[in-house]
Amino acid sequence: MHIYDDEVFKMACDQFQVIADYLNIDKNDRDRLMYPKRAMAVTLPVHMDDGTTQTFQGYRVQHHLTLGPTKGGTRFAPNLSMGETAALAMWMSWKCALNDLPYGGAKGGVACDPTKLSHRELEAVSRRYMQEMIPFVGPKTDIMGPDMGTNEQVMAWFMDTYSVYQGYSVNEIVTGKPVSVGGTVGRRESTGRGVVYLIERAMDMLKMNPEKSTAIIQGFGNVGSVAALSLGLKSGVKIVGISDHTAALYNPKGIDVKAAELHVQKKGNLRAFDQGDRIDPNELLEMPCDILAPCAIDRVITEKNADKIKCRILAEGANGPTSPEADLHLNKRWDEVFVIPDILCNAGGVIVSYFEWVQGLQAFLWTETEVTDKLFRILESSFTRVIRRAKEHKVSHRTAAMAIGVERVMKAKHQRGLFP
Ligand code: GLU
């Protein structure tokens, strides 16, 4: 299907085929499960500050509508394509199904570099994108959330734009909003908190002492920075490596992550942060540590470095950080590297988004403790099911996690039947 032609989409399809073979899925069902249900591409003309008009390309992909509305983030990134958006939507489907959320997967975004846009330009791109998407999304059809390059402010603009067109406040159209406009307390931290909850569960299972363990976190955005802070300050793990798109730092004596966070708040990135040796970002992934958490982009663990990573736990905070070729290597190292696969590891974000959506629909208010308790209960159940299935069927954690998700969607498709 050439509209989705892209390496990341191919990767998501290859992963799906591994699961389809393991589950013996009939060939008549495979394409139906794999290809997105529908997609929309839009061109966004925007007035720039210098007086020119620039056009941006925007996308939204809804992967399947079998279990309810679709749900997924909105990514603002320079090279975003329809294919990558489709891959991310497919991963959202398996993630939501694994965690028993009543959603199909979706993803969307704009091909733009948000760091190069002024505040006013970012607002114009965000509002124009939502305006173009109005016929395609809705609180019962497709609910947007944040992803790479977007934040609470962008979600507030989305919500406002949609609401102005409806004539009343529709805060359940997006999640990850600021608390002041119907956001849920703890949503911003939820993905990072979930990553750390699962790392702690894995450490407990593997009888590792957090205070004697070290961690390297790739990515210092919403996921990586919260994970680094919580792992370093609450769990007592020594953070020996951090990175973002401007710098990679390694310090075997430990990095003060609070200082790193304050630095990023002031300067916008880690470029001038000086606690540690500056090393090649790829090399950082191969440095010795107990926990390696890729929390940035896709395909950073490949067949080239899969045998070189030296961690005991690989916690996938990003979407798709490990390529299927790398998985073949990691599967052989199953007793050395304990993988917490992405659709489990980073599910905290969409789980709390689900709470926010329910709160919006029913005008409920929940405290942060209630939200976090509910989040951990869902993650605990998913973690236990994945580990049990992997053990019983002697398959990798990724295969177990994806199989649970794919099976749930397939069962629902069979029970609903094919129309007409
Ligand atoms: N972007 C997040 C993810 O990849 C979730 C988005 C949402 O909350 O809908 O899981």
Image: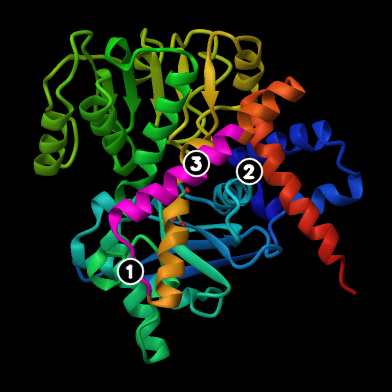
Whether residue 144 is in magenta: the answer is no
The image quadrant of residue 283 is: top left
- Tally of numbered tags: 3
Which residue is disc 2 drawn over?
9
> In front: mark 1 or mark 2?
1
Query: In the rendered view, does 234 fall on the left or right side of 64?
Result: left
Which comes before the other along the chain, label 1 or label 2? 2
Task: Relative to 165, say whether 181 is above or below.
Answer: above
Tell me the CA gap for discs 3 and 2.
27 Å
Which comes before the other along the chain, label 3 or label 2? 2
The 10 Å Cα crowd at callout 3, few under 14, some 14 to 19, many 20 or more, is: many
Residue at position x 28%, y 38% from top?
Answer: 226
Whether residue 369 is in magenta: the answer is yes
Which residue is disc 1 drawn over?
365
Task: Relative to 175, say whether 231 is above or below.
Answer: above
x%, y% of residue 151? 30, 56
Residue at position x 59%, y 27% from top?
Answer: 323
Query: In the rendered view, does 181 fall on the left or right side of 145?
Result: left
Which residue is disc 3 drawn over?
379
Label pair 3/2, CB-CB below 8 angstroms: no
Task: Relative to 309, say whether 242 is above or below.
Answer: below
The image quadrant of residue 201 is: top left
x%, y% of residue 273? 13, 26
Q: Nearer the viewer, residue 399 or 359?
A: 359
Question: What amino acid is labelled 2 in the image?
Answer: Phe
Q: Secondary structure at mark 3?
A: helix
Question: What amino acid is labelled 1 in the image?
Answer: Leu
Q: Secondary structure at mark 1?
A: loop
Decide if residue 12 is in sight here: yes
Tell me the CA gap for discs 1 and 2.
38 Å
The magenta-colored residue range is 364-384
